[in-house]
Amino acid sequence: MFSMTRLMLGTILLLLSVTSVVASEPVKIFTSVFPPIVNEGKENPGYAYEIVEEIFKVAGIDYKISQVPWARAQAIVENTPGSLIFPLTRTPTRETKFHWGFKMFNTQTHFVTLNNNKLTRETAKTKLVSVQLASSWDNWLTENGYTNVVRLSNEGEQHIRMLSAGRTDAWYAEKSVAKDMLKNMDIENATFSDPVLSFDTYLASNKAEPFKEMDKLKAAFDEIVESGRYAEILRKYHLL
């Protein structure tokens, strides 16, 4: 009888230990690189990166952020229960693929040229346009019938080099990303179209099994907005 009791207690302690290990595993968060939204360096990791870090700090939840190519980040989260992704803009193409936790900010897109040609939505359809593969901008071009599109796995320098070499006519990009990259490459003669579209950008999760404490993250987000920390981060990246 005594041995049976010891065995049962041992089993219970083992189960509690396993549960504790599982519970302590950091939340898996995936993103990519699109300066200044998300940067590669740790000193200034990007405004979206810092917002997410602050959310988890306030919420008191352990996490691990992994930077991978954007198409891969989306594929991982689509197939990984409980995982999170940012900064994911909400498009018809993505609508049914993710659980849309909450909006963090808006992004604004433009067609960018280097030949003083200010494009419109319609005139851009006659041009060869580069865009980041699997980005919401890429989704939008497909959804709206743009067929002359060059899709590149990364955002940034390669798009500008192709424009400079005349290999493409325009680059479709988010405003802060385009301005940051053009500045870093000392290019001052870029022409921006009028704003094409404003996208809502989210902290999102796996669709089949969403992150279970999303409400806690949203409360933390609201807290950093109300405290002024959110605006402080945006000012750091010259967005306010």
Image (cartoon, helix red, strand yellow):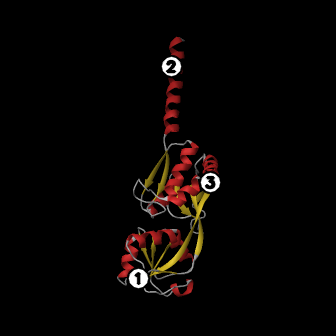
Whether residue 206 is visible: no
Q: Position of residue 179 (x, y in %)?
A: 47, 72
Q: Position of residue 50 (x, y in %)?
A: 50, 54
Type of amino acid at the residue the image marks with label 2:
Leu
Residue 51 vertical placement versus 163 (above, below): above
Q: Nearer the viewer, residue 147 or 50?
A: 50
**Label 1 CA crowd tier, 10 Å (few <14, some 14–19, many 20+):** many
Q: Nearer the viewer, residue 120 or 76?
A: 120
What residue is disc 3 on?
225
Q: Position of residue 163 (x, y in %)?
A: 39, 80
Residue 186 vertical placement versus 118 (above, below): above
Numbered marks: total: 3
Q: Is residue 234 left or right of residue 68?
A: right
The mark closer to the camera, 2 or 3, is 3
Residue visible at 43% across and 84% down in the picture: 169
Quadrant assignment, res 189? bottom left
What residue is disc 2 on?
7
Residue visible at 45% across and 69% down in the picture: 180
Mark 1–mark 2 CB contact (< 8 Å):
no
Instruction: Specify the label residue 228 is tagged with.
Output: none
What residue is disc 1 on?
168
Q: Secondary structure at mark 3?
A: helix
Residue 32 vertical placement versus 210 (above, below): below
Alpha-carbon distance for marks 3 and 1? 40 Å
Alpha-carbon distance for marks 1 and 2? 71 Å
Q: Nearer the viewer, residue 86 or 108?
A: 108
Residue visible at 54% across and 64% down in the picture: 239
Type of amino acid at the residue the image marks with label 3:
Val
Type of amino acid at the residue the image marks with label 1:
Thr
